[in-house]
Image (cartoon, rainbow, N blue to C red):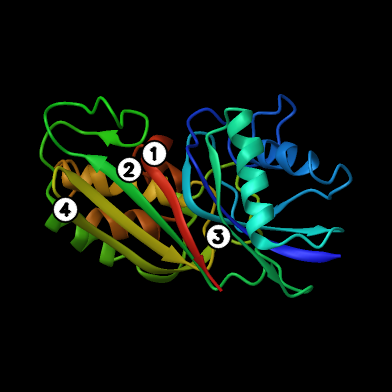
Amino acid sequence: MTRYKLTIEYDGTPYFGWQSQREGRGVQDAVERALWKMEPDAPRLKCAGRTDAGVHALGQVSHVDLKKNWTAYTLREALNAHLKQADEAVAIVAVEPCEERFDCRLWARRRHYRYRILNRPGPSALDRYRVWHIMKPLDVEAMQQAAQSVLGQHDFTTFRASACQSKSPVKTLEQLDVFRAGDEVHLEASARSFLHNQVRSMVGSLVQVGRGIWPASRMREALDAKDRAQCGPVAPACGLYFTHVEY
């Protein structure tokens, strides 16, 4: 028995999120169907961080124990061949054998997310399901100022979905940066772990600042309120990317 670490990229548009679904439209389902063509009795996959419907990943991490001693190259190529044949929007970027005790979720030191906003008058024909299109110019400096006010360890109840299953709303936000990248505004967020919908909730509130609807100071006021009703509109899933995990 060998434990393998898989680094996975996917376009979340056609899926109901990472987690396996009764309808079979979770990203997990797609990868497991490919895996079971190679080892029919392989166990279910574990992942570093579940993503919601429509959210994308550049570096999701999963682990699985397999009976056969596959080479990393063979396992990666075979999984990708099965995924391609099934017309899945998923790719295995890397495979590596790892320690038996490695746990892709528990061993994660830091998770990184990026949010993309297309900030120009015209929409995107190529990335319409991969960015949030906002026509009017955003005040990025004000958004960055507001973002820095919520760094550190706090009770993030305001930015927590009602269905969140985390035992505590207290998290330590290590990075929340806002900057321009050509026609886009990017938001980069990093923490050991996040609450359900935390990043999208913070992005939606920061956009209120960028639009001039909120002053920059309102972001910290909303956080301190510990009240979900004080959160701005939640940003759509299409612009969010789970970029990578640090171990």
Distance between the alpha carbons at the discs numbered 3 and 2:
19 Å
The reply to whether dot 1 and dot 2 touch (C-beta < 8 Å) is: yes
Residue positioned 79% across, 38% down in the render: 37
The reply to whether dot 3 and dot 1 touch (C-beta < 8 Å) is: no
* Quadrant where the image shows the C terminus: bottom right
| Residue at image mark 1 | 234
Q: Could you say whether the residue bearing mark 4 is in a helix, strand or loop?
A: strand
Q: Amino acid at mark 4?
A: Arg
| Residue at image mark 2 | 204
Left or right, residue 177 beside residue 151 = left
Q: Amino acid at mark 3?
A: Pro
Q: Position of residue 76 (x, y in %)?
A: 63, 52
Q: Position of residue 20 (x, y in %)?
A: 71, 37
Q: Where 100 falls versus 214 (above or below)?
A: below
| Residue at image mark 3 | 169
| Residue at image mark 4 | 180
For this rendering, which residue is in front, 56 or 77?
77
Q: Position of residue 185 (x, y in %)?
A: 21, 48
Residue positioned 30% across, 35% down in the render: 132
For marks 3 and 4, give the one nearer the viewer: 4
Distance between the alpha carbons at the discs numbered 3 and 1:
17 Å
Q: Amino acid at mark 1?
A: Val
Q: Amino acid at mark 2?
A: Gly
Say whether disc 4 or disc 1 marks the residue closer to the N-terminus: 4
Q: Could you say whether the residue bearing mark 3 is in a helix, strand or loop?
A: loop
Say whether disc 3 or disc 1 marks the residue closer to the N-terminus: 3
Say whether disc 3 or disc 4 marks the residue closer to the N-terminus: 3
For marks 3 and 2, give the one nearer the viewer: 2
Distance between the alpha carbons at the discs numbered 1 and 2:
5 Å
For this rendering, which residue is in front, 216 or 67?
67
